[in-house]
Amino acid sequence: MVLWKMRLLSVLVACATPGCWVGYLHPGFMVPSEARERVEEAAIRYNGALRFGNMPMAMQWVKPELQRPLLDLFGDGSKQPIRFTDVDIQSISLGPERDEARVLLLIRLYRLPSLTERTITDEQIWRYDPARLNWVVEPNLEQYASIGVEPARGPGPAIQPGPVPAAPRR
């Protein structure tokens, strides 16, 4: 009888601890709708963090090797940072093991110093990382790199110092 109560207590403690639910250990054990909800929540939070310039928050969903290039495009240290004005999830497709997802987004954005808004479609690839117990995105940085880049301008024609010519008479 005591052994039964000990086992029940250990199961209750394990279930109450964050990260110990079966669905958090590996998404393959989840029902498809639950996996989809978790990917959608991660995508909303990640893209929302990008939209509002909260780079430290956004980095928790980015593969470590892609964090520096992402900061170069979206961070405040960028010469021409990209800013989102709206992000709308169009669809989410889960892989057969439910540990990979493709998230199709419709994004409205602009790239400083221009304020011309553009609309693009972005397909993000998300993978579940069991070591981090989190979904991780592999952003398509090449797609963003060329958006609204202002061409480099040379020094222009040299202005010769000297007298200003008189205005023609009318």
Image (tube, rainbow, N blue to C red):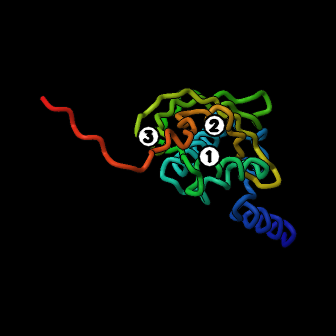
Of 2 and 70, nearer the camera is 70
**Cβ–Cβ below 8 Å for labels 2 and 1?**
yes
Give the residue at x 66% y 54%: 59
**Around disc 2, counting alpha carbons within 10 Å, would you say few (fewer than 14), some (14 to 19), or many (20 or more)?**
some
Q: How far apart are marks 3 and 2 (CA)?
A: 15 Å
Q: How far apart are marks 2 and 1 (CA)?
A: 7 Å
* Contact between labelled residues 2 and 3, with CB atoms less than 8 Å apart: no
Q: Earlier in the sequence, mark 3 or mark 2?
A: 3
- Tell me what residue is drawn at x 80 percent, y 32 percent: 97
Q: Residue furthest left?
A: 170
Sequence order check: which comes first, mark 1 or mark 3?
1
Q: Is residue 82 left or right of residue 35?
A: left
Closer-to-camera residue (14/4) = 14
Horizontal side of residue 16 vs 7, given as left or right: left
Look at mark 2 in the image and give the residue it sits on: 145
Q: Which residue is labeled 3 in the image?
A: 114
- Residue occupied by mark 1: 73
Q: Earlier in the sequence, mark 2 or mark 1?
A: 1
Residue at horizontal 55%, vertical 31%? 105
Amino acid type assigned to the residue bearing label 1 in the image: Leu
Regarding residue 32, the answer to whether it shows in the image is no
Mark 1, other Cα within 10 Å: few <14 / some 14–19 / many ≥20 = some
- Identify residue type, mark 2: Ala
Q: How many labels does the image show?
A: 3
> What amino acid does circle 3 point to?
Ser
Q: Position of residue 33 (x, y in %)?
A: 63, 34
State how far apart marks 1 and 3 are (Cα): 15 Å
